[in-house]
Image: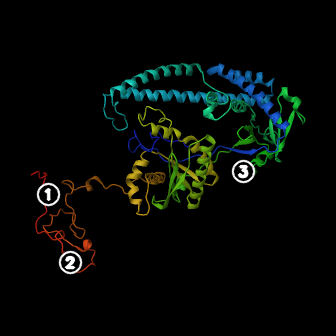
């Protein structure tokens, strides 16, 4: 995850509410701390699938019972309560299965607790915005970083009622927080809600029931270093043989010694297979998870393990060969290569993705776009990629942007968390570092200082392309502006700003010059004639010289 090292930054490209100069310093993001690979269990027999379903359903019921006990303990839960829960589960499974179940339950409760805290903060932020806008007169304009009053009395009244409703919700949410009450649904609340909208979900009742049951199964086990092949519960040999330690009530289904069941299928991890084999042969911890994809009717095995912490390269080393600035948008990455001096090189690049559709489709789209981006950046010869440290947590409330419903939907639809985690993990594999920068004003200043200079008659530069230059320059430690402003004393004459500019050939151009009575006139550009030594005479009244003095009337002539 890309986390900012300094406070005060703005989690948006517009930079609303941030003082100029209070940006967070760029930093090199840490690499991934874990690895997960997956392979399909091919060639399973009917008996194999039957055993997997029975084991998953049995352990799932134990997990649901343990989750109920954990939620009942609330914030009073401690080591003694954890040990008591584990003893109660051991009789119906085994000591290792009980340890995996209780750990998964604690993680699920902690995740719900963090979501509850985020909900509280969202309510408080929305109430602060409502209270501020309701305190202003109708139609009052907002200042820098602060919204104004509501436009009409009708809108003011509607928002006042919404504020009262949010206060009631906040009181109830705080009471649940103090009591340690969380709302958790094993299998997912979205799938549970779709039971009442089968037509919209495109499922029959039987199909929904299969998905619901499969999502509530439990077939995962944590690894343990020093044990055979790194996991005693779900064991995978270097040859790809998969065996499961059956719970006590299902021990009669074993086809191997020590209450184990060996599956007919064999696995061979194509991605990171050598790294997985090294861990298995060295008896280092590897966690496994078996799950069924109801839509495809396929069983999969996922292996995961922790990686040793790898220190990132220094920031100056990442900047040495230039950088690729990337602007993240709702449907594409805009990228531009910059040399170490901050100058754009080559042409801008665009990597599109589509975030509509189901979650697997969105995840695949982001993954493919990141892959194309990383391959292009590696071919440029740079050592790092500069990207905005996006975090739209505070902007998801509907009260911050008011009528801008489309923008709220756009911000909420961007998977910033998954994008940052996946980008950091995939960049580490190709040897590229990630330099995170403060996103404040990158879009605005990029369009202001770089969009027009980088555009040509044959190349149109969008504001997103210009924003990628701003991101890259900030990652390199350069200001976004193309040129630094001169000192204040040199921005104008001592007596004020200059009103008349001298000709380029005049050596005394720094002085003020009186306007010429008869300005130089040349008809060659208009007649498209060849340049001559003498001025060609014009044959039209429009281009004829005027002996008079040019003057501008201060007031329009209305006569």
Say few, some or many: other residues with alpha carbon within 10 Å of mark 2 (under 14 / 14 to 19 / 20 or more). some
Residue 361 lies in quadrant? top right
Which mark is first along the chain, 3 or 2?
Answer: 3
The picture places residue 89, in percent across and down from the top left corner, at 77, 24
The picture places residue 302, in percent across and down from the top left corner, at 73, 42
Question: Which residue is more in the foreground, 39 or 310?
Answer: 39
Look at the numbered discs 2 and 3 and tell me whether their residues touch, using CB distance below 8 Å. Answer: no
Q: Which mark is residue 536?
A: 2
Q: Residue at x 90, y 35 (%)?
A: 257
Which mark is first along the chain, 1 or 3?
Answer: 3
Quarter in which the N terminus is drawn: top right
User: Does residue 313 sit above or below 524 in this rendering?
Assistant: above
The residue beneath circle 1 is: 552
Q: Is residue 311 left or right of residue 325?
A: right
Secondary structure at numbered mark 3: loop
Q: Residue at x 65, y 29 (%)?
A: 108
């Amino acid at each position: 995850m890309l986390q900012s090292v300094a406070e005060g930054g703005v989690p948006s490209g517009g930079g609303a509410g941030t003082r100029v100069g209070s940006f967070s310093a760029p930093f090199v993001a840490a690499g991934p701390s874990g690895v997960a690979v997956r392979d399909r269990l091919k060639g399973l027999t009917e008996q194999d699938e039957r055993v997997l379903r029975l084991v998953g359903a049995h352990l799932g019921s134990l997990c649901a019972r343990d989750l109920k006990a954990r939620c009942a303990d609330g914030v009073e839960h401690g080591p003694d309560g954890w040990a008591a829960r584990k003893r109660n589960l051991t009789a119906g499974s085994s000591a290792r299965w009980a340890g995996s179940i209780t750990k998964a339950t604690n993680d699920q409760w902690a995740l719900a607790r963090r979501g509850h805290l985020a909900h509280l903060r969202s309510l408080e932020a929305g109430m602060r915005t409502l209270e501020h806008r309701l305190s202003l007169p109708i139609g009052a304009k907002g200042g820098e970083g602060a919204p104004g009053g509501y436009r009409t009395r009708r809108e003011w009244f509607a928002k006042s009622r919404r504020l009262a409703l949010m206060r009631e919700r906040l009181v109830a949410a705080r009471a649940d927080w103090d009591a340690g009450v969380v709302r958790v649904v094993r299998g997912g609340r979205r799938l549970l809600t779709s039971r009442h909208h089968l037509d919209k979900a495109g499922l029959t009742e039987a199909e929904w029931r299969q998905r619901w049951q499969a999502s509530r199964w439990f077939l995962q086990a944590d690894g343990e270093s020093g044990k055979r092949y790194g996991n005693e519960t779900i064991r995978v040999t270097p040859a790809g043989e998969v065996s499961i330690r059956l719970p006590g009530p299902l021990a009669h289904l074993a086809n191997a010694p020590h209450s184990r069941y060996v599956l007919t299928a064999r696995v061979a991890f194509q991605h990171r297979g050598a790294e997985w084999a090294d861990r298995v042969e060295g008896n280092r911890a590897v966690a496994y998870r078996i799950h069924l994809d109801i839509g495809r009717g396929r069983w999969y095995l996922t292996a995961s393990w922790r990686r040793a912490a790898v220190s990132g390269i220094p920031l100056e080393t990442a900047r040495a060969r230039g950088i690729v600035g990337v602007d993240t948008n709702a449907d594409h990455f805009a990228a531009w290569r910059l040399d170490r001096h901050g100058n754009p090189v080559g042409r801008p690049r665009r990597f599109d993705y589509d975030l509509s559709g189901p979650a697997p489709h969105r995840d695949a789209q982001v993954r493919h776009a990141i892959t194309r981006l990383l391959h292009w950046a590696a071919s440029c010869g740079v050592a790092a990629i500069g990207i905005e440290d996006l975090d739209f947590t505070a902007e998801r409330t509907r009260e911050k942007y008011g009528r801008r419903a489309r923008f709220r939907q756009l911000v909420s639809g961007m998977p910033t968390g998954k994008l940052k985690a996946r980008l950091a993990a995939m960049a580490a594999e190709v040897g590229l570092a990630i330099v995170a920068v403060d996103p404040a004003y990158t879009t605005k200043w990029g369009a202001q200082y770089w969009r027009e200079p980088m555009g040509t008659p044959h190349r149109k530069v969008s504001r997103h392309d210009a924003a990628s230059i701003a991101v890259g320059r900030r990652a390199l430690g350069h200001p976004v502006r193309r040129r630094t402003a001169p000192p204040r004393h040199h921005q104008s004459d001592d007596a004020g700003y200059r009103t008349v500019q001298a000709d380029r050939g005049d050596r005394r151009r720094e002085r003020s010059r009186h306007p010429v009575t008869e300005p130089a006139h040349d008809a060659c550009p208009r007649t498209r004639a060849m340049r001559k030594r003498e001025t060609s005479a014009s044959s039209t009244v429009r281009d004829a010289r005027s002996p008079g003095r040019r003057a501008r009337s201060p007031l329009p002539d209305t006569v």
